[in-house]
């Protein structure tokens, strides 16, 4: 059933998308979509998501009846490490795509979540129900999933405001001289290959903090903190400073061939042992959107990466 709302703007001055999201307990993404579809008017005219409202204005919103998500729940194994009325925390396995996309219409984390939690249907949007942030297919580890629109909006806002702490464990080729190291560089599509990302002029601001935890023979084990959340950010930034992620087929393909000399055998062995990128979302800290409690989660390296790290330490 279509829902029509008339909202009066008080003394608060805010962007239209934030105002609609706050007043209707929607995610900002969903509010922006309603505005983009022409379903939000300001004093009788079509609204623009970034416009600033003034006291006394009248905002009318038409919220269409929820459409069924064109997704099917699938009984797939997933590791849920936290579950309450508002959110889930999942420890994703490497090889699982987070949400459906061309070429991956099934077998995703979203399909698995909808099987176990059908109430997620439509939360935060139809195509990525519940998803607040994502991990690359071959990156393992922790991510948070919202179970209500209100939680999705709060968690998404916290993510944008950099109030969600996301720490990764990574291995990179070579040795980083400065630790800790902050890597800052705007990320956008690589103009030479649109399937890749790169540090490019005009890209979106991105900041990554890197700390060396262990120094191996020709690689480092790193603790990496995301200050922003751009596509492939850690992989792009480490490659940009000359220390790509071990096992990364996109940004480090063949890179280890430049590490010759007497350690070449060790380098080749580590490359063979890392059958996917050595990148794991190991820590997640954020405030619960309802209780305000600070939640902290940690995830140990999965077996494949742990075995590679143990071998590297002994080399």
Image (spheres, rainbow, N blue to C red):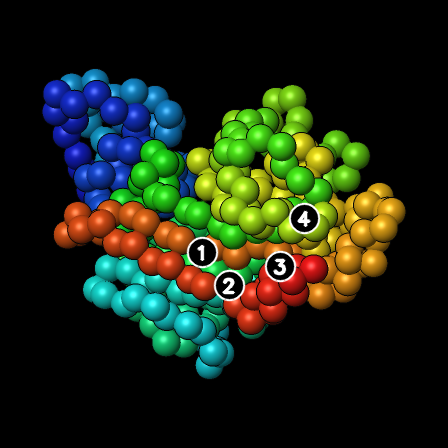
Residue lying at 58% horizontally and 30% vertically, measured from the top left: 178
Q: CA distance from mark 1 to mark 2?
A: 7 Å
Task: Estimate the x, y position of residue 297 in percent, counting from the top left.
Answer: 34, 58
For label 3, the SS is: helix
Q: Nearer the viewer, mark 3 or mark 1?
A: 3
* The disc label shown at residue 23, or none: none
Pick the residue in front: 148 or 32. Answer: 148
Residue lying at 61% horizontally and 22% vertically, measured from the top left: 202
Q: Horizontal placement of 229 versus 119: left or right? A: right
The reply to whether discs 1 and 2 touch (Cβ–Cβ < 8 Å) is yes
Q: Horizontal placement of 260 versus 283: left or right? A: right
The reply to whether discs 3 and 2 touch (Cβ–Cβ < 8 Å) is no
* The disc label shown at residue 301, or none: 2
Q: Residues within 10 Å of mark 4 (few under 14, many from 20)?
A: many
Q: Disc 1 marks which residue?
A: 282
Q: CA distance from mark 2 to mark 4?
A: 17 Å
Q: Residues within 10 Å of mark 1 (few under 14, many from 20)?
A: many
Q: CA distance from mark 4 to mark 1?
A: 19 Å
Q: Disc 3 marks which residue?
A: 313
Q: Disc 4 marks which residue?
A: 219
For label 2, the SS is: loop
For label 4, the SS is: strand
Task: Estimate the x, y position of residue 158 in percent, counting from the top left.
Answer: 31, 40
């Amino acid at each position: 059933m279509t829902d029509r709302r008339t909202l009066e703007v008080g003394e608060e001055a805010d962007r239209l998308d934030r105002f609609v999201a706050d007043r209707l307990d929607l995610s900002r993404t969903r509010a922006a979509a309603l505005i983009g579809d022409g379903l939000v008017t300001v004093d009788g005219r079509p609204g623009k998501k970034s416009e600033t409202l003034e006291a006394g204005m009248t905002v009318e919103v038409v919220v269409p009846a929820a459409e069924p998500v064109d997704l099917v729940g699938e009984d797939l194994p997933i590791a849920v490490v936290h579950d309450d009325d508002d959110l889930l925390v999942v420890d994703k396995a490497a090889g699982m795509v987070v949400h459906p996309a061309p070429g991956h219409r099934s077998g995703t984390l979203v399909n698995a979540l909808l099987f176990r939690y059908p109430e997620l249907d439509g939360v935060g949007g139809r195509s990525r129900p519940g998803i607040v942030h994502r991990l690359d297919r071959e990156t393992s580890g922790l991510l948070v999933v919202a179970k209500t629109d209100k939680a999705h909006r709060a968690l998404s806002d916290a993510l944008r405001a950099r109030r969600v702490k996301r720490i990764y464990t990574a291995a990179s080729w070579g040795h980083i001289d400065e630790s800790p190291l902050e890597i800052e560089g705007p990320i956008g599509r690589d103009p030479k290959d649109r399937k890749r990302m790169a540090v490019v002029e005009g890209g979106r601001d991105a900041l990554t903090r890197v700390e060396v935890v262990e120094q191996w023979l020709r690689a480092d084990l790193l603790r990496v903190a995301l200050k922003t959340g751009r596509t492939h950010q850690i992989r792009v930034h480490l490659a940009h400073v000359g220390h790509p992620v071990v096992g990364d087929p996109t940004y480090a393909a063949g890179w280890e061939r430049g590490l010759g000399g007497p350690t070449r055998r060790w380098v080749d062995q580590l490359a063979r042992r890392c059958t996917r990128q050595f990148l794991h979302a190991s820590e997640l800290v954020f405030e619960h959107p309802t209780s305000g409690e600070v939640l902290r989660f940690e995830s140990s390296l999965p077996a494949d990466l742990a075995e590679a790290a143990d071998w590297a330490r002994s080399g």
